[in-house]
Amino acid sequence: MKIGIVGSGLVGSTIAYAVLFRKAASEIIMIDVNEQRARAEAMDIAHAVPFSHPAIVRQGGFSDLKECVIVVVAAGVNQKPGETRIQLLGRNGAIFEKIIPEILFYAPEATLLVATNPVDIMTHIAGIFVKKSGKPVHQVVGTGTTLDTARFRSLLGTLCHVDPQHVHGYVIGEHGDSEVLTWSVVDVGGFQLEAFLKRRDIPFDEKVKNDIDGQVRNAAYTIIEGKGATYYGIGAAAAHIVNAFTHNSRAILTVCSYLENVRGITDVTLSLPHLLQGSKVVDILPLNLSSREEEALRTSAGKLRSILDEYQAL
């Protein structure tokens, strides 16, 4: 399977590297406005091919996206000192206005996977350009809270002393401060979380819950404070999504996509569990949330809608 990655900075190049080692693609096209950077990253990653699997990794232009099944969008600019988030969105929106039509022209059937932050808003903006082209809006998804969900499950696995792959729980809503940890639907080996912890005689109270919540919600801030950027986690998350698409694994992942209505908030893009089949989203799964979680999800959707209103008023 052939995929493209637009944006060859730390996130885009890490995604390419992770895709290679997941054996999720047979050809990876790396595109960046800085062609020298894209060429160097592609060359460096190509040198790792003998340690992974037969694959082509090369720098290219938009015309090289022909026949791509997935195009990952990791392009964007960083926030300047004193710049508001809305001003940053304006600049990144202008970048998307240039690159999304180019992607759709050369790879009209490709699914677009957006990794640029703030990912919910940028996925929504990409969806606007997709709709303008006459394509279905669900042709574009974002990495959403896939990484947040992994962080949540990892911490729950540590708490329960079990492999996190046997823990099922989701982080939904915004990929950011208003995200919602769905404690009420956490399942461990078929047991509801509290029942499992009680059976295993593991202490669990609000303090434990708040500590896990804080670690999940503030992980990016902690990493950025320590090393300036996050890219390994999101690189692995994006590669996992690409792998689900290219290998038709029928995975259920908390990617973000356009939704007409979320708890009374209309026209918004956020994360819920999505069933992926082939290279498409085939269903968006509702969760049986507690009333507190329902209200938190509505608040998260409202926050995103407010940001979109500000952006669209620019």
Image (spheres, rainbow, N blue to C red):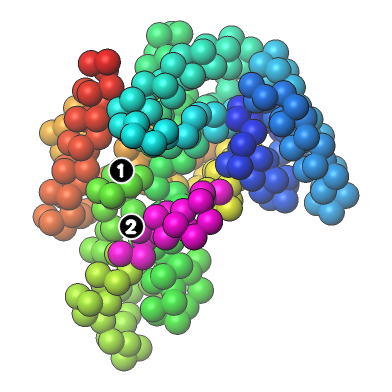
The disc, 2 or 1, on the residue closer to the chain's N-terminal end is 1
Check the image and report above or below for 48 versus 123.
below
Residue at numbered disc 1: 174
Q: Main secondary structure of the magenta part?
A: helix
Q: Secondary structure at mark 1?
A: loop
Q: Quadrant of the N terminus?
A: top right
- Residue that sits furthest to the bottom in the current view: 201
Residue corresponding to mark 2: 217
Residue 51 is labelled as none
Task: Identify the residue shown where x is 85% and y is 45%.
Answer: 47
State yes or no: discs 2 and 1 in contact (Cβ < 8 Å).
no
Front residue of 164 and 42: 42
Q: Quadrant of residue 35?
A: top right
For the residues labelled 2 and 1, the Cα–Cα distance comes to: 11 Å
> Which mark is in front, 2 or 1?
2
Q: Residue at x 61, y 42 (%)?
A: 10
